[in-house]
Every structure is written in C-alpha cells, then in structure tokens.
Image (tube, grey):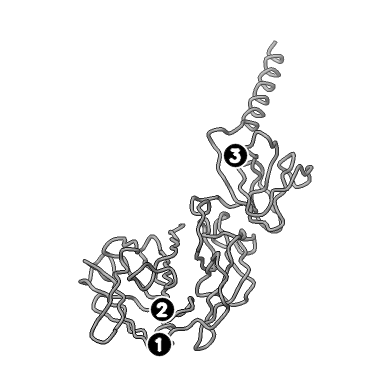
Amino acid sequence: MKKTTYILTIIFLTNSLLYSQNTDCKYHQKICKVISKNGLNVRTEPDINSKTIMSIPYWENVKVCQEKYSTDTINDIVGNWLKIADEDISGFVFNGFLIDADTILLKNKDIRILVENIFCAPPNFDPKLNWYGLYEHGKIDTLIKVDVTIRRITINEEGKLENNDIIIETNNNKQAILLIGTKDTLTEKIAFWNNKVVHKSDFLYPGEIFRIQGYHRTFELNAIGTVKDNIDCYKKFADYRLLLSERIGKSYPTQDLMKDITYRGECTSLELKWCGKIDNDNIPDLILTTGSTQMITIYLFLSSKAKKNDFIKKVDEWTIGSCY
C-alpha cells in the first residue's frame, strides 16, 4: 500500500511539473525583438538539436513567457530557452538573440540617436531608418553612412558584466561621436562648424558664454543661473537656463533650449558635446547631454526641423540609466 501511494505521489508531482512548464503564461509574458539578422528559429523543444518549426525574421516582435527553461550557449552567447506565448505557435526560442521591446522601441520615430558601447537597456534603434555615424577625423568631423548591429555580449566579453548586456556597434572601425538614424537620406560630408568648439567637450556652467562662428554668422550659447558648491554634488545650480542667440547688428534673437531639456534637479550637469553642421544650412546643430549620478540623457538638436522663429529643434533624446 505504501509503495502504491509513493508511486502515485511521484506521478502527481511529475504531472504537476509538466503542467506548470506548459502553462500559457497568461500573466507572465513580455514582448521581445529579434536581433539576429539571420532570424530566430522556433524549435519544438528547448534544445538546439530539436526540430525547427519556423524562423522569426530580424527585428520582428515575439511574445514569450518569462519563465526560463534550460541554459544554453550558442555562438558563445549564454542564454535561456523561453516558450513562445502565442496560441498559434507552440515552441521555444533562445533568448540570446532577443532583447526586451521597451516602449521606446515600439514607437514610430522619424529620427533616433544612439552611441556605441555596452548597455543593459533597450537601444533606441530602428533598422528601417538610414543610419549615419558622426566621426572625428583630425581637425574635421565627417558624417558617414553606417550599418548598425545590436547583439548580446559573448562569454569572452563578459568579465563583470551581466548576461543581459547588449553591444551596439557598426561596420566602421572607429567609434562615432553619435549615431543618427533618420527617414531622410543625408549627404555624407564634412560636418564641422568651428573647430574651436567642435573638438572639446564643455560643461555649461551659469555665467559662461560659448561663441559659435562660421559662414558669416555668429551664435552664442549663454548659460544663466546661480551656482554654488555643495556636498551632495560638485556644483549646485538654481534657476538654470540655456539660451541660443544670434548676433545680428544690435539685435539678439534668442531661443530658450531648456523647454526641450529634462532638468533633473540642482545637481544636474549640462554639457555641450558637439557643435557642427549636419543639416545643409548655416545654423549650428548641437549635441547636448544632461547627467546625474543615476543617468545620462543625450539630446540632438537640428536646425532643419526648427519651428518658425526658432533656430533649432530637439529631434530626439536617449536616456542611459545606471545598470548596476
């Protein structure tokens, strides 16, 4: 009798385990993007040697269960097998070729910006856009068309990094100042504005004025506010404003850029990363960053998208948070 009870218990536990593994995960689902340019195979079992059911194309959305199955290493990438959460598809995919589809990835945007590096957050990327890299070459900067790749780190690159980190890279052997994706086709060209400003990175502290000259026009970036030393941060700002103006005789048409910049408190630092000519006009385009101990936000301002009576317009921003 005891032996029979023991066998029935084993059968019950086994069936319970199988049922929990084959749940439709209705309350534990997430949407991911396929980052393998060759597509992602859906298999009958969580095993590389199991039968392939179908292939999901590059950058397509796929809904998966969050429950992780066996761990595997494919192409030196360590990951887990996940079950497809779709009524019409019964199979498993390897998450080493997936990234979480954050809301930023699901929005339709005409312009996006990226930087090359290792991140543990969804990239601001869309392969349907035309991608260009802004590169420094000696005393000039150039805008060059590039092919952007998003991939997981491999076991040889891990070190102290976590498994969910991704690498953003291009087919250019140099690292870009910024990657710009746009629906428009841009001209590959020299993109500098004035090398005295372009080739250095400056914090925009209150009271400082950065003069930008070129093509018979003179612009000024003027930081306004009060600053004092603070134990919580290097500098503490109050009533901060950043003004872009043009000197035209005795008049100074001015645009306040802070209406388009997220200011994260008095310990936020604002930095001019680059100034030059991406658009084909005589007004400077800017790359600015705001930073704190927790995150950095990059802003791209273009003159060609500016509203009437403005010089430039913020066309995109990307926030990189603290991962660890």
Of badges 1 and 3, nearer the viewer stands 1
Q: Quadrant of the N terminus?
A: top right
Q: Residues within 10 Å of mark 1 (few under 14, many from 20)?
A: some
Q: Amino acid at mark 3?
A: Cys
What's the distance in space between the residues labelled 1 and 3, CA to CA? 56 Å
Residue at position x 55%, y 58% in the image: 165
Q: Amino acid at mark 2?
A: Pro
Q: Amino acid at mark 1?
A: Gly
Counting residues from the N terminus, which is met first, the one under dot 3 or under dot 2? 3
Q: What is the x, y in percent for residue 247?
A: 29, 84
Question: Given contact means CB atoms under 8 Å apart, are the residues at marks 3 and 2 in contact?
Answer: no
Position of 213 relative to 227 (above/below): below
Residue at position x 76%, y 42% in the image: 53
Counting residues from the N terminus, which is met first, the one under dot 1 or under dot 3? 3
Q: Residue 240: name its quadrant.
A: bottom left
Residue 228 visible in the current orientation: no
Residue lying furthest front: 308
Residue at position x 38%, y 89% in the image: 216
Q: What is the x, y in percent for residue 264?
A: 31, 60
Q: Which mark is residue 284?
A: 2
Q: Residue 12: name its quadrant.
A: top right
Residue at position x 63%, y 68% in the image: 147
Residue 262 visible in the current orientation: yes
- Assign a secondary structure to mark 3: strand
- The residue where tag 3 is placed is 65
On screen, residue 103 versus residue 7, left or right, reads left
Position of 230 relative to 250 (above/below): above
Counting residues from the N terminus, which is met first, the one under dot 2 or under dot 1? 1
Q: Which mark is residue 214?
A: 1
Q: Residues within 10 Å of mark 2 (few under 14, many from 20)?
A: many
Question: Given contact means CB atoms under 8 Å apart, are the residues at marks 2 and 1 in contact?
Answer: yes
